[in-house]
Image: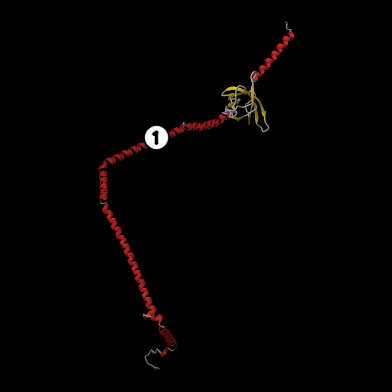
Amino acid sequence: MKIANETKVGILAAFAIALLIIGYNFLKGNAIFSSETVLYAKYPRVDGLAVSKPVLINGFQIGRVDKLMLQPDGSILATLKINGKYDIPKNSIAQLESTDLLGSKAIVMALGTDKQFAQEGDTLNANVQQNLMEAVQPVQKKAERIIGKMDSILTSVNSILNPNFQKSVDKSFSSIAATLSSLEATSKKVDNLVGSESSKISGILNNVEAITSNLKSNNQKINGILTNLNTVTDQVAASNFKQTIENANKAVADFQDVANKINSGKGTVGLLINDPRMYDNLNNASKNLDNLIIDLKENPKRYVHFSVFGGGNKEK
């Protein structure tokens, strides 16, 4: 049977088209001869994620990202196509992670422990991990602070290496050395003085030790003397206080006796206070004395008479 050229061209064209479709799907990562399970994951942001990015488990690819769709709330819904021969637990987490320093990302499955597996159309739990640059930023800030501190340290070192500063340091060390030499000479003098006067110092220490020993041996006697002295002072204080109280009581009693006598009319003061006749007599005597003085002023010749020449008539 002879095949026409047109038939051969048609068969060849169909084979080329099929091969092109298969190659295109292969390049996109689509599974051609195996079934796939469609799952979903929602992310707040998908920086670095694109269609055809792999879905990995421990670095092994089990699927790919088929679509990315913007939702009304601003989140991104990712359509994942997983090879049908791999079962994914329902509580697994689809983590969006960085795969390189350039910011490319992939979806890494953190498998859960649920006994039930995700079915066609299920939405998995999802989260977004920091990319490598975001994770490095805190380290970068710390490195910048460290570099700033190192710069200040180097500046200080440069100032120390300044010739003028070195001269000042040399002068300081020279002064310290001179001070240490003076201290050494002073300590030698003190050692010589102590050596020459060691016998006197020993005698002084022996005398002090003897005095302290004497005080220690007579401690009981000293305590007795202090106790007796305390007792004597207490008795003196008590006796003086008792005598003072007795004198005060006696003075009060004497005053009370005098007051009683005055109230009873005894004595001159009592008669003066309690006897009205004494008052009347004194009042009359005062009046008579007043009249006498008035008459003396008006008629002095009646009471006093004198003459310069010692003669003359005397009138009675």
User: What residue is drawn where x is 66% and y is 17%?
Assistant: 22
Q: Which residue is mark 1?
A: 174
> At 33% from the left edge and 38% from the top edge, which residue is drawn?
185
Residue 224, by quadrant, is bottom left
Furthest residue toward front: 115
**Callout 1: SS:** helix
Which image quarter: residue 222? bottom left
What residue is drawn where x is 40% and y is 34%? 173
Q: Amino acid at mark 1?
A: Ser
Looking at the image, residue 93 sits to the left or right of residue 17; the answer is: left
| Residue 42 at x, y percent in the picture | 63, 30
Query: In x, y percent, where is residue 252?
Result: 36, 71
Viewer can see residue 95: no
Quadrant for the C terminus, please. Answer: bottom left
Residue 232 location (% of width, % of height): 29, 60
Look at the picture and state if 276 lies above or below 193.
Answer: below
Residue 211 image position (x, y, % from top left): 26, 49
